[in-house]
Amino acid sequence: MDESRGHRFIGRTEELRILRNAARMAARGIPRVVTVSGATGMGKTALVDHFAEMAAKEFTVLRAWDVPPKADLPFYTVTGLLADGAEHLSAREHEPVGPQSSVLDIGGAVIDLLDTSQETSPVLFWLDDAHRIDLESLQSIGFALLRQDAERILTVICTQHAARTEQSMGLPDLVPESDRIQLTGFTPSETREFVEDRTARPHSEAKLRSLAVWSHGNPLFLEAAIGAYGGKLPDDPAAIRVPSSLSDAVGAWSRAFPPRSLAILNMLAVLDTPAAVPLLGLLLDSDSVGADAEILVEQHAAMWVPDQVPTLHLVHVGQRDALYSAIPRPERNRMHLRAAELLEPPAAWRHRVAATETYDASLADELRGAAAREARAGHAALAADHLVASSQVDPDSLRRQGALLLAVRLQVTGGQPRTAQRHEDAVLRTSPGPQRDEALGLLSLAKGRDALASTYLNLSRDTYTARGDLAQAAYAAAELGVAKGSLGLGQEALSTSEFALRHAPDDVVRGLAEANRAYAHALLGGPGRGLSHLDHLPEHPARVPATHTDTLIYRGLFRALSGDLTGAVSDLSAAARRRELGMSRISSVTALTHSLWCLLALGEWDEARRNLSVALDIAHTTGRPADFFNLHCFIATLHAFSGRSEAARDALREALSLEASADFSGPSFHLAATRATVAFAAGDFEETIAALAPAVDELANTGRSRLYSVRHMPLLGVASARTGDLDRARSVLRELEAAEPRGALVPVVVHWVEGAIAAADDPAAAAASYEEGLAVPPHGGDPVAYKALMRQDLGALLMEAGETERAREHLRTAEKVFARLGAEPYRQQCGTLLEDAGTSAPVAGADFWETLTDRERDVAGLVALGWTNREIAARLYLSAKTVEYHLGNIYAKNDISGRRELRDLMQSRQM
């Protein structure tokens, strides 16, 4: 095979075939993902490195890896990747990378980098040692991969834990064009080839069989064993000393190097990061590091890293671990302390912690001080990192425990709940007390166990209060307010939130408490009341402080439920682009999901589908169970009104499976409302009532029903009127009339329910109600979907009354709106009524629209608005290549000559 670093590349024929085939597919515009996994030392990096050398003739190679390792710092790896490719980035509509950047924004930047990189050649995107990469970077990259459709990109992921890495990236079952390579040891013949290549001489079968058996064909194991003998194995097989482990083999190998070369290896293992020759010279007090390193590079024990200054790196993570464990503890400590003298914090602190055999009060104080400074600056992840280190070296057991528990709080409230969950076992081992209860409550919230969280956080708040520690009680109270609101306990949520506001020590706690207080008021008095408690926020969402992001999401929600649909979309869209702050079930996915309902009511169903696509991919990379539940409820609604009944039922089943894992009743209420919506879309009004009425009547759901009444009560009112249950219909009408409207939506649905009630015995009054509803000015956004439903009802009513001309006018208008929305069942109903009147005509563009996939509809809708491919790509979080691909499919399916004809078709559909 090809020569590489002085030795032939051995074996891996089938694995290289898989990679080559994937590369050929990617070069043709079919993106592929290949996961390469295997135990330490099996040659994952060596395989892909060899493949990359061959592919570099045709591919641009982008490599992302965790060097130096900072797995607890959000976006660390992907920020480095973007910085390396910054000169290639084009102007995309995402926020710059910063402390509050979200997965949505960083993922968009990755998409842009990959898009730009493939303009001249296909791209090999290589994630090396992905199991060491920080979670947020994996999520951002996963989001970018989920948005691929036609890129010339081959992504190769090297990891020790394939399933875990793919799960972190959101890839399982979502990237069908993928392959998996599981590396195992060399075969006996490959072992012979490898050993004879490295030793430059043949060996007996007995000797090679012995090597193959105890090494399991592990290339690093073999390399280390050969190196331990200076590249020459004894002639007598019995003389071969069999290492008991990979660590022993690497240790013996390292001892075969000259002392000054071995010192370089050991220092690289202690640093656990590439190191420049000048730094190594200072650390080792040597002026011959460059020369001493050459034998290491020749013998595959180290490698040069391309940089402006000559820089050395160990060849393998497993090699580093083996070298590090082989260094005698006193020598290892001395090396850590030497590194601490020459390096700046926080690297210096890391080495001091590593060198500490006994507790170090001074170091613990420094780390706690650094944590406090980072927390004040808003760097929760760094602060938590310092606190975890402090918990390892502090001589005071109570302070050790306190540092760990405070680190958990910072990780959860700083948007790193999954990182915090790694400490759950350690938290459970801590002594009982309010800080432990708070940490367990936060971890329960992160897992969606809100009832359990409430129990823990209640205990924490009450114990802190009894001790007179009101500042800490305020923290627990603010977090408890989240749980109480989620449980629908408005008065309790209000009480604990006001307690938090009275004693809150900083803006982060106050922001969360203000959000919870507003939500509590909304549960008790409806969305208008909740909104009145947020009037102090800046009108422009960009001016709302980062510490009040949860408050911004609530304002968007309350605006939507009060009828200010356009204001709601503005708030929710802005919040979705932020990285979440404050511990709550709210997330960027939640903000996007609430915006979907607004867009549905506004008749912007194409935009809703576009946001849904993004929200699903974000949920698969960062989502919690509640996010998936809410999204599947919306999917069921959209499919039902689009006439995809089977798909709606599938989404309902998925939501049901997610609802079953909750320990509180909120999801069951929203699932009942979704079932009712699906039934209403199918014209099954009896089922609408059967699904929704019991949930509305249940005492535990009083607050939720009041808050979300504008979403579900109009359907219940109309369904009740149409089945003859006028008493319930009138009760619904009274509840809607009592709302505090801030836009056109509430008056419109009031007239719709009012007309449905009157239609039973006073058609003229019903028609008048419908006419008044259609005349409501579009303040806060025109609720186009509801007006179309009302217009259809008015047309049918006028048809029965013999007012055919007026009926035709309303039915034609409604039919066009439904066609534009993709609400096929309602379009057909209008068509049937018009046929009965003898005036049916096909809606322009309807057949064309049905040929398109959801993603093609997204693209076509933006073309109709005059957007360029680059602008469409930025809006949809796609590459320009993918946009071109979908446009090509649209043209081919419908024999369209180009962009102008597509725009004309789209505009005729929207007339």
Image (cartoon, helix red, strand yellow):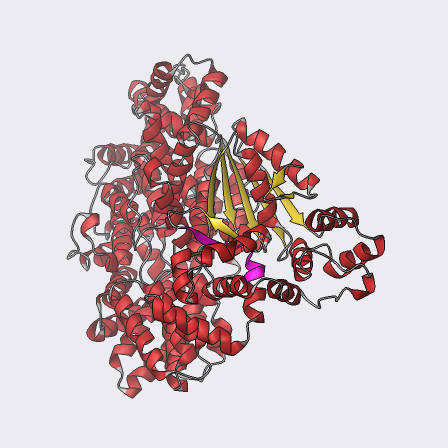
The one of 760 and 653 positioned closer to us in this rendering: 653
The one of 798 and 903 positioned closer to us in this rendering: 903
484 displayed left or right of 886: left
**Would residue 312 be counted in the magenta stretch?**
yes
Q: Position of residue 842 (x, y in %)?
A: 42, 16
742 displayed left or right of 308: left
227 displayed left or right of 650: right
x 28%, y 55%: residue: 554
| 737 is higher (above) or lower (below) than 485 | above
Q: Position of residue 789 (x, y in %)?
A: 35, 34
Magenta span of residues: 310-320
**Quick check: can you spot residue 678?**
yes
The answer to which image quadrant residue 680 occupies is top left
The one of 155 and 637 positioned closer to us in this rendering: 155
- Quadrant location, the C terminus: top left
- Quadrant location, the N terminus: top right
The answer to which image quadrant residue 82 occupies is top left
| 529 is higher (above) or lower (below) than 865 | below
